[in-house]
Image (cartoon, helix red, strand yellow):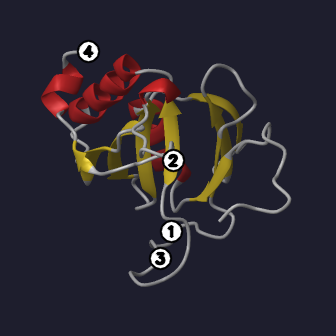
Amino acid sequence: MKSPDPIDPRVDIGHVHLKVADLQRGLDFYCGVLGFQLMQQYGTQAAFISAGGYHHHIGLNTWESLGGSPPPPGSTGLYHTAIRYPDRKSLADALRRLQKAKIPLDGAADHGVSEALYLHDPDHNGVELYWDRPKAEWPRTPNGAISMFTKPLDLEGLLKE
């Protein structure tokens, strides 16, 4: 559905803030496994992490969730946080990190416009790690509309990057 009054095209998603049950466990995953950098921490209650020195891409806190459990199936909430990597080689590095840490994937897909890895963090928040193909390579219909799909991702091919 095309909006009659579209948003400014320069708008983007600045960060995501996640409720976690154990802050250190969250930091061990996002910093220790994925490689984000800790920018600021407030004791055992909150931390702000980033890639490349930005003030924060991800916030983690225990303000309302210390010791808590994930939302039950069938409830509303965040489906997943999508972390975009700059290229296929960087996504391959993320897969190697997950394998080294023995973190299982829930799935892996080629969407035509992107390639993605799907998993859950230690608090069972959904996480998508992906890279976008260049726009010129996106699949299109004969009238020029984007034509995304979901096919299995060749993980062995990805690891050859």
Residue 161: mark: 4
Q: Which residue corresponds to the image point at 23% horizontal and 25% vertical from the top-left?
A: 158
Residue found at the very far front of the displayed protein: 143
Count of numbered marks: 4
Amino acid type for the residue under numbered disc 2: Ala
Secondary-structure class at tag 2: loop
Q: Which residue is mark 3?
A: 71
Judge from the rendering whether residue 1 lies leftward or rightward of residue 154; answer left or right.
Answer: right
Vertically, is 139 above or below 72?
Answer: above
Mark 3 to mark 2: distance in Å?
36 Å
Q: Which residue is mark 1?
A: 67
Q: Earlier in the sequence, mark 3 or mark 2?
A: 3
Amino acid type for the residue under numbered disc 3: Pro
The answer to whether any part of residue 134 appears in the image is: no
Q: Which residue corresponds to the image point at 47% horizontal and 76% vertical from the top-left?
A: 71
Mark 2 to mark 1: distance in Å?
46 Å
The answer to whether any part of residue 79 appears in the image is: yes
Residue 52, given in percent of the width and then of the height, sits at 63, 19
Q: Earlier in the sequence, mark 2 or mark 1?
A: 1
Question: Which one is closest to the eye, mark 2 or mark 1?
Answer: 2
Residue 116, given in percent of the width and then of the height, sits at 35, 41
Residue 73, given in percent of the width and then of the height, sits at 38, 81
Q: Earlier in the sequence, mark 4 or mark 1?
A: 1
Question: Which one is closest to the eye, mark 4 or mark 3?
Answer: 4
Question: Which one is closest to the eye, mark 4 or mark 2?
Answer: 2
Residue 145: mark: 2
